[in-house]
Amino acid sequence: MNYWDKKLIREQLDKKLNVLKNFGGYIPQQGWIKTIREVLGLSTSQLGKKVGIDQSRISRLENAEKTGNLKLSSLQKIAQGLNMKFVYGFVPEDTLESMVKDQAKRIALKRMKILDNTMRLEKQALSEEEKKKALDDMMEKILIDNLKGLWD
């Protein structure tokens, strides 16, 4: 897959993930399992019957969720028993595209520093406008030619 294909996919994924930005990170204090169970009016034994596991296991799952020690497969099983969808994902702070561009910029700035020092020593220093153009060109080249090495 080339740079342009990956860029298009990142942009499309950014649009879909943007919807989740306001939601991202919210977890009820008691955890999702217990909160949903209680608002539906289910006891642990009733939820256990719906899911196909015993009541004590439901209590252990609720506690494991609060401590972050719950398997995704367990959450999927609970959701299925509740006739709900289990949703799992990552929501970037900004956008995937900006993450890639920021990383390319960091690499380009390092390279530009070396280039600028060399050019000044040779009395061929670039103007601020030329530096900006060179930086933009270098970022684009990094993104197009070396996307796999971007995070090395």
Image: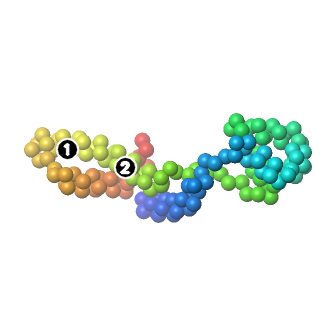
Q: Residue 76, can we see it? A: yes
**Can you tell which mark lies on residue 104?**
2
Q: Nearer the viewer, residue 61 or 136?
A: 61
Q: Which residue: 34% across, 45% down?
A: 107
Whole-angstrom CA distance, mark 2 to mark 1, is 18 Å
**Can you tell which mark lies on residue 19?**
none
Contact between labelled residues 1 and 2, with CB atoms less than 8 Å apart:
no
Name the image quarter holding residue 74. Answer: top right
Q: Secondary structure at mark 2?
A: helix
The residue that label 1 is drawn on is 116
Query: What amino acid is found at the position of numbered circle 2 in the picture?
Result: Ala
Residue 52 image offset from top left, x and y in percent: 88, 48
Q: Secondary structure at mark 1?
A: helix
Residue 58 image offset from top left, x and y in percent: 83, 42
Residue 32 lies left or right of residue 146; in this view the side is right
Q: Which residue: 76% across, 37% down?
A: 63
Task: Report how many numbered discs are placed on residues in the image.
Answer: 2
Query: What amino acid is found at the position of numbered circle 1 in the picture?
Result: Asp
What colour-coding does the image apply? rainbow
Residue 149 lies left or right of residue 123; in this view the side is right
Q: Residue furthest left?
A: 123
Q: Nearer the N terminus, badge 2 or badge 1?
A: 2
Residue 50 lies left or right of residue 130; in this view the side is right
Residue 133 image offset from top left, x and y in percent: 24, 56
